[in-house]
Image: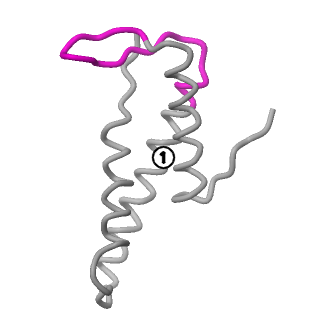
Amino acid sequence: MRKLLLALSLSLVAGAVVAQNAAPPKQLTEEERAKIDAQRRAGCKAHEENLKMLKGSGPLAIEEDGKQREMTPAERQAQIDQTEQILAQYCGIKKKEG
């Protein structure tokens, strides 16, 4: 079974949300802006890869209480829905119909 590594990419998005809700923003240097853009692109790429795995036919394992188990179809669909929302909101990638 392949592991689904959502925690890392979700933490990138969560960090962006916290940053958006913080005190009034300071002016960013070009270097800071480039670093943030690179992190956003990396997070978006990770979410796109996760979505491909989630929509694939192979089994996916998740860790629960220190043990791995296969995701249920309902858990898989919930992750697909959440990942599509994140891609739309933070990456500008709309859900593909069909």
Q: Is residue 53 left or right of residue 20?
A: right
Alpha-carbon neighbours of circle 1 within 10 Å: few (<14), some, or many (≥20)?
A: some
Q: Can you tell which quarter of the image residue 55 is in?
A: top right
From the viewer's side, name the closer residue of 64 and 3. Answer: 64
Position of 96 compared to 14: left or right? right
Q: Which segment did they paint magenta?
A: 52-70
- The amino acid marked with disc number 1 is Lys
Q: Position of residue 67 (x, y in %)?
A: 23, 11
- Tag 1 secondary structure: helix
The residue under the point 56% across, 58% down is 89
In this picture, residue 47 sits left or right of residue 13: right
The residue lying at 56 percent from left, 15 percent from top is 73
Q: How is the image coloured?
A: one colour
Query: Measured along the vertical axis of the image, is residue 19 above or below residue 48?
Result: below
Among all residues in the image, which is located at the extreme bottom? 27
Q: Position of residue 70 (x, y in %)?
A: 41, 9
Q: Residue 56, percent across and down?
A: 60, 20
Residue under pointer 1: 45
- x%, y% of residue 4? 39, 25
Compare residues 16 and 72 and report the one nearer the observer: 72
Is 31 one of the magenta-colored residues? Answer: no
Residue 59 sits inside the magenta stretch: yes
Q: Quadrant of residue 38?
A: bottom left
For the point 35% across and 18% down, the residue is: 62
